[in-house]
Amino acid sequence: MIKFGTSGFRAKIGEDFTKENTQKIAQALSILINKEKSTKPVIIGFDRRFMSDYFAKWFAEVLAGNKIHVCMCPHPIPTPQVMFGVKNLELDYGVTITASHNPYVYNGIKICVKGGSDAQNELTSKIEKLSNKHLRIKSLDYDKARNLNLINEFDNTKEYLKNIEKFVSKNFKGNKTKILFDCMYGVTAEPAKLFAKMFKLENFDIINDKVDPCFGNILPCPNESCLSEFKNQVVKGKYKIGLACDADGDRLGIIDEKGEYFSNNVIIPIIYYYLVKYRNMTGDVVRNMSTSHLSDMLAEKFGYKCHETNVGFKYVSAKMKETNALIGGESSGGFTARNYTPAKDSMFEVAMFLDAVLTINKPISKIVEEVKDFAGYISTYVEGNTIVNNKQKFLKIIKTKQPKFAYKPIEVKFGDGVKYIFEGGNWVHIRFSGTENLLRYHVEFTTEIECERNTKAILNFVNDINNNKKIK
């Protein structure tokens, strides 16, 4: 069964992620492309996961079999590099074989469209529906397709990095600050080396850059739980900045000089603060429902607005386009800016973050304090996930019942999960993962005690449902 989630199709290798299903999705996309009478080539990229290069070739063979030209990346590249290519060359489609930050047993297919943005639900629903039919697969041998010029090699790494260079102030070119970059065995390894060379960063050290489809037996995601060893390396090596990117190069996590971890809940506000205050840029900011409201408070201080969207970067980029926002992002790690590719991109975020920190010229910990003090932010943010045994049962109950929170919410938003709004700007957001069997929760209150109490209320609520207790 082929099912598209918030970021494309993902499944376990050998179960639902197979050659057959890859070919079905390729055939479905081919049908739609030919129906649109598009004559533009499709860029295909892939990550470092097990057999990603093979899956990419099988996908390309089907497109070629349908007489669609393919620009084939000859080596693993970041997902946002494919999306940049689609925008830069004014193409209609791009495809990446990747499961992003998911465990190594997964792989996936992500489709991007004109302008370099994520495919919207309307398109992925059509592809999903067609893929699950009994399609006749048209496939042309890879070498034959190359001989017919239906498949051509394509490497836009230099253009991709040159484009990033246009957006930064270059204040950090030649900077000697000690920086440690963790590739997490992912595709940012080569771009990071070229990035350091381009900006003449003499003390930019790179680790975990070798190819390992098992990602060192850790989740290739730059969240705090996956970066405990990296924290130690930053502190022991006396680095001032630690940067970690996920497996396909669209998420970023930061470690400061003290070994403290910061997610996009803080990275986005730092960049926004820097762009408005130090570079005199103007505009609103966009975040999803699960992201800290620190950005809201900053925007208000500067005289702008913060816009909220559903979870999924395609919603963030769409809202940015609608409002001409300066930047946008998600707590999970996605970030982009006005006039850049409308896709989350960790290498771009690295450049913008370094531009901010090295220009302000203070330790990260001090910049975080400065930003929060300026905004008047004193809250605590907590996130986590828990397993729900029966998803459909939970969804039915949550429509009329709610966890026993410490306070009664003043507003309840249904749609992308449920978001409870409380007095004083406090809130709770719960939603199911689009790719995993998990209920995610995000809690932001003015004190740690309130965060703990309301997090406990969520976990107790889930536990009662799992144990078939009557919910009052």
Image (cartoon, rainbow, N blue to C red):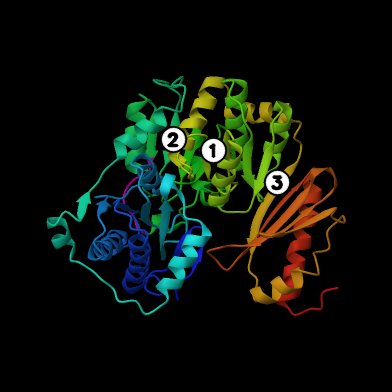
From mark 3 to mark 2, how far is it between C-alphas?
Answer: 26 Å
Residue at image coords 32%, 62%? 34
- Marks 1,2: beta carbons within 8 A: yes
For the N terminus, the image quarter is bottom left
Q: Which comes sooner in the sequence, label 1 or label 2?
A: 2
Prevailing SS of the magenta stretch: loop
- Viewer-side residue, 381 vs 268: 268
Q: Where is residue 308 in the image (x, y as percent from the top left)?
A: 67, 46
Camera-side mark, 3 or 1: 3
Residue at image coords 42%, 52%? 112
Does any portion of residue 313 appear in the rendered image?
yes
Query: Which residue carries the number 1 mark?
Result: 255
Q: In which quarter of the image is residue 174?
A: top left
Where does the magenta region start and end? 207-213
Q: Badge 2: few (under 14), some or many (20 or more) residues near its Cα, within 10 Å? A: many
Is residue 142 left or right of 334 when viewed as pictured? left
